[in-house]
Amino acid sequence: MNSGGGGVDLAFFAMMGAIFLIFYVLVIRPQQRRQKEREEFLKTAAKGDEVVTQGGIHGRVAAVDGDVVEIEVARVRGEKVKIRVSLSRIDQLIKAGQGKGDEA
């Protein structure tokens, strides 16, 4: 009596599954990979490396204590001015001995 009604539902679910799979492969998976690479890179922060925080503060790593980094940001009357920031708030890390690259 009711013929062909179930085929539309199956096609709809197959299409939604395909869209989710494409979204996962093109968006979610690459983001997870980039996040993991960033975390591994930040774990290599060492004394003497230059950093830029997400707030735009530039400085040099003075010490690393777990997830907290002490950054030397200036010198005032011969005294070093240091701040402590979370390692996760480091935006850029330039390893000691590496240049900043060619700027045009």
Image (spheres, grey):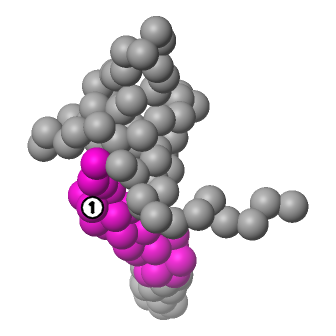
Report crowding for label 1: few under 14, some 14 to 19, many 20 or more residues within 10 A (C-alpha). few
Q: Quadrant of residue 45?
A: bottom left
Task: Point out the stretch of residues depicted in magenta.
Answer: 21-47
**Observer able to see residue 60:** yes
Query: Identity of the amino acid at label 1?
Result: Thr
| Quadrant showing the C terminus | bottom right
Picture coordinates of residue 72 (x, y %)? 39, 29
Left/right of residue 68 with respect to residue 17 in the rendered view: left
> Residue drawn 51% across and 40% down?
52
**Observer able to see residue 88:** no
In the displayed orientation, state which residue is furthest to the right: 104
Picture coordinates of residue 13 (x, y %)? 44, 78
Location of mark 1 (residue): 44
Q: The residue tagged with tag 1: helix, strand or loop?
A: loop
Would residue 29 be counted in the magenta stretch?
Answer: yes
> Residue drawn 75% across and 66% down?
102
Left/right of residue 29 with respect to residue 43 in the rendered view: right
Considering depth in this image, is 26 or 60 the residue closer to the camera?
Answer: 60
52 w.r.t. 40: above or below: above
10 w.r.t. 84: above or below: below
> Residue drawn 46% across and 64% down?
97
Q: Quadrant of residue 82?
A: top left
Would residue 34 be counted in the magenta stretch?
Answer: yes
Picture coordinates of residue 98 (x, y %)? 51, 66
In the displayed orientation, state which residue is furthest to the front: 78
